[in-house]
């Protein structure tokens, strides 16, 4: 005689069928999901052997030899996540202009790249504009002499305004290194940008 959960009376068989149906449904979902994922045929590496998934989309970017995408990858200059498959994750924290003096210690100025140059660039006349700012303030009657120690970095940090400072921002400062590239329309937007103010190679 069969017990209460025996498949003979039909109760246990229903549970088994439900379990089998559930397993089949999970397998079907996994198969469909696998088909929808576009997996790479091979993983791209830089010439130094680093995995750089950015090269799936940006592998055709051509720069001069030392900065070629296949040599240094994208993330060593532009940050982001070089191991992410999804664009949103890969582009999180991406820096459009690695030469911007606000981020240059994490990009161009890292060990093995241009770390010896960063201090010199950030303290150069083209970056600080100390003499230019001091002279403008003096001639506009905002300083007693031309010997003041004023820098663009200080001006950016304080946000101070005056006729001389605003003149500097609108004209002189548009060419210098602390200015962000692309922050103004037309000709003035092409100026500044830290390292790329002088070292940008425009595509043909």
Image (cartoon, rainbow, N blue to C red):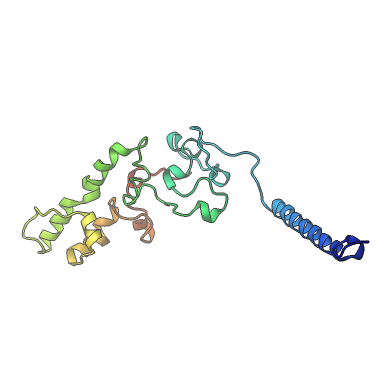
Pick out the residue farthest to the front. 1
Image side of residue 16 versus residue 158, left or right: right
Residue name at image x 57 percent, y 47 percent: 57
Up the image or down, 203 lies above or below 146; here it is: above
Which quarter of the image is occupied by the N terminus? bottom right
Q: Quadrant of residue 185?
A: bottom left
Up the image or down, 104 lies above or below 71; here it is: below
Seen from the viewer's position, the closer of residues 133 and 204 is 133
Where's residue 174, x and y in %?
29, 56
Pick out the residue farthest to the right. 1
Where's residue 120, x and y in %?
24, 41
Image side of residue 196 versus residue 65, left or right: left
Where's residue 126, x and y in %?
24, 47
Pick out the residue farthest to the top. 48
Residue name at image x 46 percent, y 37 percent: 72
Seen from the viewer's position, the closer of residues 87 and 162 is 87
Image side of residue 134 versus residue 188, left or right: left
Image side of residue 58 versus residue 188, left or right: right
For the image, the number of numbered tags is 0
Residue name at image x 52 percent, y 41 percent: 52
Up the image or down, 180 lies above or below 62; here it is: below
Seen from the viewer's position, the closer of residues 37 and 158 is 37
Where's residue 162, x and y in %?
18, 67
């Amino acid at each position: 005689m069969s017990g209460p959960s025996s498949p003979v009376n039909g109760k246990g068989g229903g549970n088994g069928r439900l379990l089998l149906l559930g397993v089949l449904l999970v397998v079907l979902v996994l198969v469909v999901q696998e088909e929808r994922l576009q997996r790479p045929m091979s993983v791209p590496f830089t010439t130094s052997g680093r995995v750089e998934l950015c090269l799936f989309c940006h592998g055709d970017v051509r720069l001069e030899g030392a900065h070629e995408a296949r040599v240094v990858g994208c993330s060593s200059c532009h940050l982001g996540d070089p191991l992410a498959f999804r664009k949103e994750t890969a582009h999180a924290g991406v820096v459009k202009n690695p030469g911007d003096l606000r981020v240059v210690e994490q990009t161009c100025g890292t060990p093995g790249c241009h770390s010896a140059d960063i201090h010199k660039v950030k303290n150069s006349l083209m970056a600080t504009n100390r003499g230019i700012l001091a002279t403008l303030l003096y001639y506009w009657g905002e300083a007693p002499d031309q010997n003041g120690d004023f820098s663009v970095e200080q001006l950016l940090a304080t946000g101070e305004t005056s006729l001389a400072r605003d003149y500097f921002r609108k004209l002189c400062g548009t060419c210098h290194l602390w200015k962000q590239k692309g922050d103004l329309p037309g000709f003035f937007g092409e100026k500044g940008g830290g390292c790329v103010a002088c070292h940008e190679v425009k595509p043909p």
